[in-house]
Amino acid sequence: MTPQPASDPLLKQAASLRSQIGDNIHDHISESVYATAAAISDRAVTRDGQVAAFRLDRAIDQVVTSRVWGFPMMALMLMGVFWLTIAGANVPSAMLGDLLLGNVYTWLHAVADALGAPWWLSGLLIDGMYMATAWVVSVMLPPMAIFFPLFTLLEDLGYLPRVAFNLDRLFQRAGAHGKQSLSMMMGWGCNAAGVISTRIIDSPRERLIAIITNNFSICNGRWPTLILMGTIFIGATAPAAVASLVAAASVVTVTVLGIFVTLIVSAWLSRSWLKGEASSFSLELPPYRPPQIWRVITTSVIDRTLLVLWRAVVMAAPAGLIIWLMSNVQVADLSMAAHLVAWLEPLGWLMGLNGVILLAYIVTIPANEIIIPTILMLTLNLANSNLAQSGVMLELSDDLVYATLTGMGGWTLLTAVNLMLYSLLHNPCSTTILTIWYETKSLKWTAVATFLPIALGFVVTVLVALVVRVLT
Amino acid sequence: MQPNSETLADAPLGATLRITAIHNQGAERRRIYDLGLTPGTLVHVETRSPLGDPTAYRVRDALIALRSEQARQIAVVRVPDTTGGPQQ
Amino acid sequence: MSNSHDAAACATCPVSNTAQVRKLGAQLGRWDYTIALAGNPNTGKSTIFNTLTGLRQHTGNWSGKTVVRAEGGYTYQGSQYRLVDLPGTYSLLSTSVDEEVARDFVLFGQPDATIVVTDATRLERNLSLVLQILAITERVVVAVNLMDEAKRHGMSVDVRRLSRDLGVPVVPMAARQGEGVAELLSMVAQVASGAYQTKPYVLPLQDAAIEAAIANLEPQIRARFPQLPNTRWVALRLLEGDASIMRAVADGTLGDVRKGLAVAPILLQEATS
């Protein structure tokens, strides 16, 4: 790809000299550089007698990449990280929930009453915007503040490149770049972060594949949905002691499903819309290093906390506002929400879901996290239940949620399962869409990344619903 | 008198080899050179992915993973290994 | 570990050099010196960047994490320093966005000093980047980081020997423990201000034809671009057919001595193009 020298005498001279010398200047320079580097370092570095360097590293790698232990170890690590995140987030989430959704909420209403604010203003600001923000903070902050530091620790330790090393063949067969496994893992924390992390892939074609499929990594924001569904519909028979384990298992299951979808869609993309040459792949496996636990924890926790707070205010608050308006603004004797739900119901039924769920998904495009409270609130609202309090998103106990959904909402096991599937296979949240646009600068590919998952979600849920209904 | 020549892809785990020639071309060739895999360099086959590919090679104190399609183009000869690792 | 305790004690002791470092984070109005921070991936480069600037760039343990480089600042002994963290690269010889970005900054950005961070446990590999950078600029300080890891693996590094062979100052460091930072700051200040004159090692190429070609081109390059300090390196790039250097010759930008180059927009552009 050398540009023509045109009339520049210097360049012409260089070109003629180049043709005399031949093409292997780069090789020659490389070899000289390395030979010199070797000589200099030989003089400067001494090793302790016969101690082979990196003996411990080698031993660890024998286990980590072994045919017998390699994959089980990865599965264990995954379960471990997910379980730690879920179990660890439980108490802080509950505490934050009590504080923000309980005490502060009540206090805010008290202040509003004292100031004589009209019902619609306090409703809008407190029941709509504040509640959405508070929900996101209490639900999202603890898991993010645990998952990301854990992930960073694994990174610093040097384990993650080994995972990429183990999984590379799968990605190779799917026509994807080996490093896609790394951005995929990053997406389990947050898809926007996952998309940014695709920068480690040089080739634009392979990078696009990684970006488009990153959505199939279940981000922290979708975990609560999966956990709740997994716990109350599927794990309902498990004793309380293993509740966290069951919750972790449901998330892991859908995550693994997500890995399959990532590989399949990558394979399809690399053979159709994004066909091309596989770029040369090489991965350096860094030496294992003891991670700086304290520094990672403080840096990561602060970063994540700030990010979640920002997101809560910028994304969730407006969503909360819209939900409140929809539930409380009446058109022809019915709330707007009721109208929209009725309109979406047929499509919802087809997908094994219902109108409430579809409406909730549309409204919560900015933030996956508030899908469950939105569904609950809409369900209660439409059933004119006392628990609704005109558009308030409440945190109910698992049993009450189950009763509400199956009783008032008419949910079945099919609904729950398809919700979990759709949770995996729908559009990315708006932050991620914006990030994709910023990274690719292409409207076309951003659109693909947004609508391809929805199309997939639609097809899969319709099929599952069809099969289940035919069989039962 | 030449010990049998083979490619890096053929080398078994634990073997120590010396690179004799690099046949990869283009950007891949540059990358390989830049990683320190040059003719005359000692390479130790350290570990392999459980799925069979890629393989991790220890080269000048670093562990580099290469896919077999790349390793296949690197010609090597066996070197007797006395210490269980490249000491150069 | 009592690191934070020691660090706090050091920070207030009037004898310690680090007492005079003020971390400026990302706010930098005007500065006296621009320092480039280069090195292989996985050498703890980002740790050093964070330590000096007080910023919190994420430190990842795999290559290519820092694609868009960051800037930060610090003051030391009364002068303001702007520190530019370049993407981690293995070499400057092959074409990838990271490497072009790093190379372009060292070449065109004309930093007052370039710190090349190396990993004590993998010196041989890391030195190739050092040698390549020495070919582009003379004002280099080599940081041999992760000395604690080297000790753990039973290796020791003769820093003085290294410094003699390379012709530039070499600073042993264990940045995670905060060790070596004072010495690094001191050497950087000396090299940047010209107080320490480096005599960098010049890489000989044992090929007569190539050396002859270089000798042929160098005078022409010097005539066209008199301010260029590294004509040998440019000659090699032209012989190799390096597209961006050829472009720079054709449109004359090779002669640009752009001090205080606005780094962010250019590098971001490179990284996303």
Image (spheres, rainbow, N blue to C red):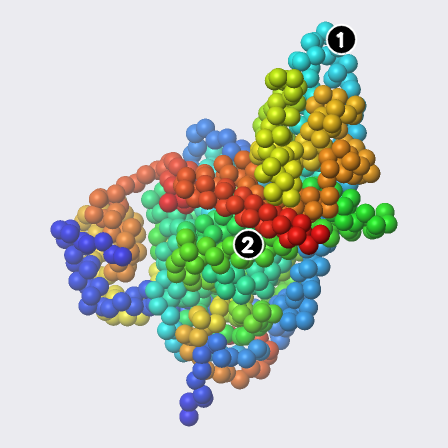
Relative depth, front residue between C173 and A281: A281
Asked whether A435 or A357 is in front, the reply is A357
Label 1: chain letter: A
x, y (%) of residue A316?
Answer: 62, 29
Q: Is residue C239 left or right of residue B26?
A: left
- Give amino acid for label 1: Ala
Q: Are marks 2 and 1 in contact (CB under 8 Å)?
A: no
Query: Of label 2 and label 1, which has the lower sequence position?
Result: 1
Q: Nearer the viewer, residue A192 or A417?
A: A417
Residue C271 coordinates in the image, percent (x, y): 41, 45
Name which residue type carries label 2: Thr
Q: Quadrant of residue A144?
A: top right
Residue A262 disc label? 2
Q: Which of labels 2 and 1 is toward the front?
A: 2
Query: Secondary structure under badge 1?
Result: helix
- Element marked by disc 2: helix
Identity of the residue drawn at 69% across and 29% down? A378
Asked which quadrant contains residue B38, the reply is bottom left
Residue A367 visible here: no
- Mark 1 crowdedness (10 Å alpha carbons): few <14, some 14-19, many ≥20: few
Is residue A225 at least partly visible in the picture?
yes
* Residue at the spot of label 1: A114
